[in-house]
Amino acid sequence: MPKTPREPPQPALPKSPKERVRGGRAKPIAELVGEVGGQAFKRFGFNHSALNDRWAEIVGATYARHCQPTRLKFPRGQKDGGTLTIAATGALAPMLRHVEPQIIERTNRILGYAAVARLSIDQGAATMAAATPPPPQPGPLPETARSSLRDIADPELRATLQSLAEALTISEGPPKIR
């Protein structure tokens, strides 16, 4: 009986994503940071890191010093109509109730959909953030700038240029976007 050649065995295909063959291209760290950060936020009940990043924009700089978002919780099986929990210093909690509709509207605008339907405020659970120093006041204009501004006939243009010159006297380096 003649022997027939046997075919070489085929490698077994991975049965699940965990058993897949490692390899492929190396990913830049920037691609992985969002996934890692997202998992950390989800672990502590926060699905949207944009709320933490843009909190001062949502509530304003004054309120942002006294409160911070802690959790965004949705009803079971839904991704909208959630409850945003805010930790606030004791005195600010009643004041937040007065601006609750604006906070909900701004939060939903930043997230891009109606994610928040109501607020829950934990009174006394936040610590006050450090105050930012006030911007420096413009100093007096040098005599050369004043004399050149006197030659301008239009009073509105002169006032605008004087305001610009005063602002430039206190500037330090290139302009910064805030």
Image: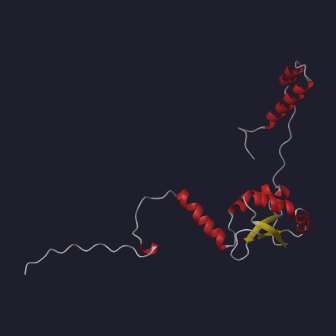
The residue under the point 73% across, 72% down is 74
Q: Position of residue 69 (x, y in %)?
A: 77, 66
The quarter of the picture where the N terminus appears is bottom left
Which quadrant of the figure has residue 101?
bottom right
Q: Is residue 165 above or below residue 21?
A: above
Q: Position of residue 167 (x, y in %)?
A: 82, 35
Any part of residue 10 in sight = yes
The residue under the point 83% across, 22% down is 144
Task: Name the one closer to the observer, 80 or 131.
Answer: 80
Any part of residue 64 in sight = no
Q: Position of residue 16 (x, y in %)?
A: 44, 75
Q: Is residue 62 left or right of residue 55?
A: right
Q: Is residue 82 above or below residue 140?
A: below
The residue under the point 73% across, 44% down is 177
Q: Is residue 8 above or below residue 26?
A: below
Q: Is residue 37 left or right of residue 68?
A: left
Q: Is residue 135 left or right of residue 94?
A: left
Which quadrant of the figure has residue 4?
bottom left
Q: Is residue 148 above or below residue 68?
A: above
Q: Position of residue 11 (x, y in %)?
A: 31, 72
Q: How many labels sit on residues?
A: 0
